Amino acid sequence: MYIQNYFATAGLSILFLVGCLIHLSENDVFSLETIRKFKRLIYVLMVEIVIDFLFTILEGHEIDHFMLYSLKNIELFLNPVLSFLVFSVFYARDRKWRSDKQASLMNRTCNVMIFLIIIVGLLLLVSVFGWNVFTIDEMHKYRRDALMPVYLVVLIASVVSFVYGLFLIADNTQSSLNKTLFFFAGCLIVGIGLRSVLPDTNYDFLCMAVSVVFLLVYYSHVTLRLDPLTKLLNRQVYMRLLERVNYTTIILMIDANNFKHINDTYGHECGDRTLKKFAKLICQAYGKHAYCFRIGGDEFCVILKPGAFDELIEAIPHYDAYALIRGLRDRLDELVAQQKNSKDDRIHLEYGVSHGGGVFYQPDTHLTISDKERKSFREVVLIADENMYKAKEEFRRQLAESSGTDLID
């Protein structure tokens, strides 16, 4: 009965993973690199499930100790490798992050996970000198040994590292599924905990298989929310947010001046690089406090997150919301000016940006405002858009007066 239950649990885990492989074979949203990473993760997990099941069948029989040692060593070594493979689905060293600090943290997390895999390998190798993570007794049974607590600590550190990395990625992609991410991580932690408390069970593999399903759901969510070029939130998410905002916030509409001229003069490849760099500057300026969108072409939008208005307005004298808008605009202008003075000749933001803002007040807000300022959210968006185009026209007029040159867009 024990072997039958073990087989049923392992079989159910494999079935979940086969379903994931079928989904990946039909997936035309993920990149080929991402699909390869997911498949690599699934195949390694399948191998570990099969190895664990073989060990369970062979344990207690007259089998060569070397075979049992080899199977268990491979299984124990693959545990932290699986954590790294989950992490690698989202991570690449050459991926563009919203800030240098984020990139540094991600690289460090990756290095820590690789280091932990090496530590596990060394723990398993030192058994040659009599220091064992586990032993196979004279009855051909698996027994934990003195170094098992050390192994478990390293394994937990590996899981904590990749969960930390996933939350960094969630922040970088402006994900709204943090609860799903918590549940995904919880499945893995519960599985590892079950194996630690109940070593004769294999529910950890079932938990891992279920977590892969959640990982696919989460990655699909992230992919479909992002603009493919800039990795900001896309127009679809922007339109959904317009229907749901019910808190006091500020909306900024942003447009890159003379972007058509950049495309016509330097080519569309340079234009794409400019948009990517511009998106990164927007995230650097507002990413901590706001949702950042690309809503079309060279047009972007920033909407403060819940609670951000109250947090930022406290630093403004007399709680002047329009002074806060000016401060937010100046923050981006300063970053664009720094970029214009840099030595990166591939990016051409020499004409700067135009932006317009508006304030939406929650209907039951505690702030004392006039009825004239109380507008619907869509009305505020239109006001911000109008202000942005007024700023663009003013910039066009000033450029024409100073140089006799007009902007193309």
Image: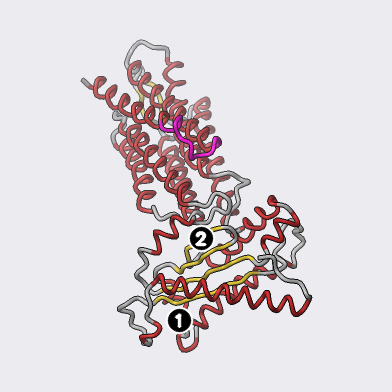
Mark 2: few, some, or many residues within 10 Å (few <14, many ≥20)? many
Label number found at residue 314: 1
**Mark 1–mark 2 CB contact (< 8 Å):** no
How many numbered discs sit on the rendered protein? 2
Most extreme residue toward the top is 62
Q: Is residue 138 above or below residue 378?
A: above
Q: Which residue is mark 2?
A: 293
Q: Position of residue 203 (x, y in %)?
A: 30, 33
Q: Nearer the viewer, residue 161 or 350?
A: 350
Q: Nearer the viewer, residue 163 or 357?
A: 357
As shown in the figure, which amino acid type bears the numbered disc 1?
Answer: Glu
Residue at position x 40%, y 62% from top? 241
Q: Is residue 142 above or below residue 170?
A: above
Q: Position of residue 58 (x, y in %)?
A: 35, 15
Residue 3 placement, left or right of 249: left
Q: Position of residue 245 (x, y in %)?
A: 37, 67
Q: Position of residue 302 (x, y in %)?
A: 50, 66
Q: Nearer the viewer, residue 174 or 254?
A: 254
| Region of the chain picked out in magenta, as a range | 23-33
Q: Is residue 190 magenta?
A: no
- The Cα–Cα distance between marks 1 and 2, rounded to whole angstroms, is 25 Å
As shown in the figure, which amino acid type bears the numbered disc 2?
Answer: Phe
Residue 45 placement, left or right of 204: right
> Do we see residue 118 in this rendering?
no
Label number found at residue 25: none
Q: Quadrant of the N terminus?
A: top left
Q: Quadrant of residue 2?
A: top left
